[in-house]
Image (tube, rainbow, N blue to C red):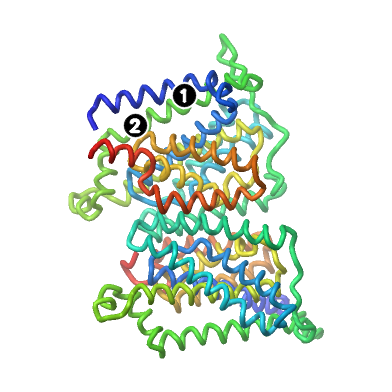
Amino acid sequence: MTQLVLFNVFNGLIIGAFYALMALGLSLILNLSGVINFAHGGFLAMGGYLAYSLIPYVGFWGALLVSPILVAFIGIVIERVLIRRLYGRDPLYSLLLTFGLAFMIEDGTRFIWGAQSLPYQIPSWLSQPLSYQYFFLTGYRVFMVLLVTAAVGGLFLILNYTRLGIRIRAGTLDLETVGVLGVNVRVLRNLNFGLGIYLAGLAGVLASGMLGLQPNLGDNLIMPSFIAIIVGGLGSLPGTLVGGILIGVVSGVTTVFLPSASEAVMYVMMAAVLIVRPRGLFGEEGRF
Amino acid sequence: MPKFDKRAGDILVWALLLSAPFWLPTVGSYVELGTRVVIYALAAMALNFLLGYTGVLSFGHAAYFGLGAYGTALTMKYVYPSTPVGMLAGIVLGTVAAALIGPMIARLRGVYFAMCTIAFGQVFYFIAFQWFSLTGGDDGVSAWHRAPLDFGFATLDILNNNKAFYYFVVAIFALCAAAMAFLLRSPFGRTLLAIRENERRARFLGIPVDWHIWMSWVVSCFFVSVAGTLFALMNDFVDPRALRWDQSGNFVIMAVLGGMRSFWGPLIGSAIFLVLQDYISSETENWMSFIGLFFVLVVLFFPRGVLGIIRRKAAS
């Protein structure tokens, strides 16, 4: 029993790290630009599919490196052409626009790569179980946790120690002042969008190694990321990280006792947070 | 706009709606499309009660639409095969769910409100999808059908006569539209407008803002669940797609496309959207891309909607 719980806690950690990776990207864009990027799931799927097509040419590691960057580049172009026009307007419009983008990306991937699910090749030494003795755990899952940890660590290093990151954090607090101080706010928002989409692309490559590829890959992952942001608190990146891991672990543990409630328990947590502390665990008072 | 114009607009809308079954076939369309337009128009108008008149952005209305539909379908299949009873059950289910969720989100504003309505909306999608023994999961609730209406002295065969069903839907639509217009003209509706225009000032005047937003949310979800019951009756079937997030997006785009600040805007939006969808999905398999592109184009070029543009032209 303990073993089963432990296994599910670890599994929940992996899934949670994953939700966090996606939610961090969403949160970055939401905090600086006030845009809920509904197409985030689409960018995630795009990352997976691009990596799938790149593997024959550059191999697994090359695809892992190149695909998220390509997706981020596409994101930057889309921000520049479409989303930029909607800053400062009612959030309704950016939400509708990203909604439409989500449709287009999902249908586009189905058009290019087909509707049936595709297998995603990972190196054989990674797909081997590490140990049969305690519980079933493939090397890929451990690798995922390590990579997500590295990515999140890298993100916080960027945000705390580079000029771009410090400007992003400052812009989250008071964009107008940052603009007055001579920072090009348009470029800042553009790069920030690219950074968020990069995280989505990376999550996509990792997810396809675990779940295989489907055009609606991102659909199932976007709702938990929303919940992660709400539970963690809007406006707080550490909050989003904690929120993602928390809902992953809680839903993992619930799987042991009541498998059919593993989805529902996330929403129960969200409801509890909204009743007790509407701003979320780490959210600032009065931000939204 | 002068008052005369408004009266003329109302008369034009009703004349078109009441005569639709007679002219729809002559323009190459069919009665069922008209029925669908009216049902979606009711849903979009209900959403607009919240979006356009209270100024609160909900992206989760499909949930209450779907609950209305599921309530009707399940009641008519398992409990009692009567159309009014099924409708009542659906409306109660949708409204009660909305009333319970309301207090949790009525304190939130803007993007945060939108996000929480999306997330709460998905709860019911998962329930409908996973509770296989009751809802049939992905396959939906089938093997039931709407029952003819029995008034005691006469029966209206809404099952086999598609024109009769159309007029039944229009009658319900008229009742709901009248109720919404009445509410918007009442002190309650005026208070909602005040909250939309300046929430802080409304609060200073002593208006319980959160309570009003909760009320407006419940009223809006009540009408959207009425639309949901009609949707289930129209299809004699309901599946989880009725309450998925893309359905919520459809309602919002209809309201925006027609004009959020106009009473009849969502009706026009619904007509344009559904005719277009009907046409595109018969022409190409990739209709989703075109609908997505349509969303993008509306946001970029018609953010005020059809009626908003007309009104602006009339004013200048």
Residue at 48% x, 77% y is: A195
Q: Nearer the viewer, residue B157 or B283?
A: B283
Q: How many marks?
A: 2
Whether residues under marks 1 and 2 lie with C-beta atoms below 8 angstroms apart, the answer is no
Dot placed on the residue nearer the N-terminal end, 1 or 2: 1
Give the amino acid at mark 1: Leu
Location of residue B180 in the rendering, given as x and y in whole percent from the top left corner: 37, 33
Q: Which residue is mark 1?
A: B17
Give the amino acid at mark 2: Ala
Residue at the extreme top of the image, as rendered: B153
Residue at 49% x, 25% y is: B170
Relative to B259, does residue A236 appear above or below in the rendering?
below
Residue A168 falls in which quadrant of the image? bottom left
Q: Is residue A224 visible?
A: yes
Location of residue B308 in the rendering, given as x and y in whole percent from the top left corner: 33, 41
Residue at the extreme right of the image, as rendered: A132
In the picture, which quadrant includes the N terminus of chain A?
Answer: bottom right
Horizontal side, residue A232 vs residue A147: left or right: left
Secondary element type, mark 2: helix
Disc 2 chain ID: B
Horizontal side, residue B195 vs residue B273: left or right: left
Relative to B141, does residue B145 appear above or below in the rendering?
above
Circle 1 packing at 10 Å, graded few (<14), some (14-19), many (20+), is some
Q: Nearer the viewer, residue A218 or B148?
A: A218
In the picture, which quadrant includes the C terminus of chain A?
Answer: bottom left
The numbered mark at residue A277 is none
